[in-house]
Amino acid sequence: MTAPVALVTGAADGIGWATARAFADAGYRVVLADLRAEAAAARARDLGPEHIGVGCNVTVEADVVAMLEQVRRDCGRLDAVVNNAGIGSPHLPTTDQRLDEFERVLHTHLSGTFLVSREARKLMAAQGGAMVNISSIAGLGGLPRRNAYGAAKAGIAAMTRSLACEWAAAGIRVNAVAPGYVETALVQKLAADGSIDAAKLRRRIPMGRLGRPEEIAAVILFLCSPAASYVTGAILCVDGGWMAFADAGDAASEA
Ligand SMILES: NC(=O)c1ccc[n+]([C@@H]2O[C@H](COP(=O)([O-])OP(=O)(O)OC[C@H]3O[C@@H](n4cnc5c(N)ncnc54)[C@H](O)[C@@H]3O)[C@@H](O)[C@H]2O)c1
């Protein structure tokens, strides 16, 4: 039997790279797609000769069509898709936010998820499969000064639900994870430029710490596994309790 195939976008770093490793460990052949073609190829080599690194900007239709054509040609099947590629947005008062930056963030998350899902669906048609999109706590609650990012992640949650309903009969489950703050390059950059205060964040998280990329990857893998065979259209928070907390003051405390 041929190994199942998983496509992970934004796989050269952070949550995407952890997810690619998790799928490879679970016996999948992994297609690692990233804007940074060289980095994706190097990560694929790290995983082993059966894995494939592809340069792809998920916002460029021709790139996405060509990537899925390559998956069809080289793998002949597609069982799992993780729409992970994403970028942060500058944390600025709304009156200082620029339209081009607003559009860039929405385009990356929404057009990217739409295009990859649309093209992947054509290849998954035969045997069904599972997709996982990456939303965020930023799409579920209000984070001041982050209009574009929050709107993009709320949009991904909405698209997850609509695709789940449309493709359920075809045996394709579509879910999302909504991570809290996870220690990746994206978050390190926000900490370095002063956009976030890591110590303050830890106090706001009931579990008292940021997440690790591997902890998001494990849930993504679960959602693509037979153990989640009756789960579709779900937005699953993986946030150390962030969204559960609604009290005043710090959330992290001694037991
Ligand atoms: N880190 C967090 O705390 C956190 C929290 C919630 C959600 N997320 C989401 O998780 C996803 C991954 O975040 P991360 O923290 O691992 O980020 P990261 O910056 O560490 O990695 C993102 C990867 O996506 C790639 N990428 C960016 N734009 C792309 C494009 N247009 N086409 C293809 N690849 C592209 C980058 O090259 C990079 O390798 C993003 O969607 C992000 O919004 C992250």
Image (cartoon, helix red, strand yellow):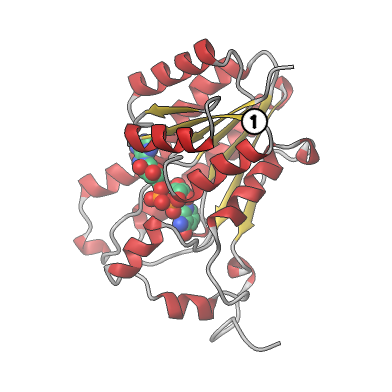
Is residue 181 among what the camera can see? yes
Q: Which residue is drawn at 52% across and 59% down?
A: 137
Residue 17: horizontal and vertical position, in percent? 49, 44
Q: Nearer the viewer, residue 210 or 248?
A: 210
Q: Residue 125 location in percent, x, y?
A: 64, 15
242 w.r.t. 71: above or below: below
| Closer to the camera in the image, 218 or 250 | 218
In front here: 230 or 166? 230
Which quadrant is home to the N terminus? top right
Image quadrant where residue 121 sits:
top right
Q: Mark 1 points at which residue?
A: 28
Q: Within 10 angstroms of label 1, few (less than 14), some, or many (20 or more) residues?
A: many
Rendered residue at 60%/48% (across/down): 217
Q: Nearer the viewer, residue 5 or 86?
A: 5
Where is residue 93? Give x, y as percent.
26, 67
- Where is 175 relative to 149, above or below? above
SS category of the residue bearing label 1: loop
Q: Which amino acid does label 1 sit on?
A: Tyr
Q: Which residue in the rendered view is the most extreme toward the bottom? A: 254
In the image, 14: left or right of 252? Answer: left
Number of numbered discs overlaid on the protein picture: 1
Residue 202: image x %, image y %? Answer: 51, 77
The residue shown at (40%, 36%) is 42
Q: Is residue 175 visible?
A: no
Give the quadrant of the C terminus. bottom right
Q: Would you identify the image quadrant in which residue 103 lies?
A: top left
Name which residue lies at 41% across and 27% down.
Answer: 54
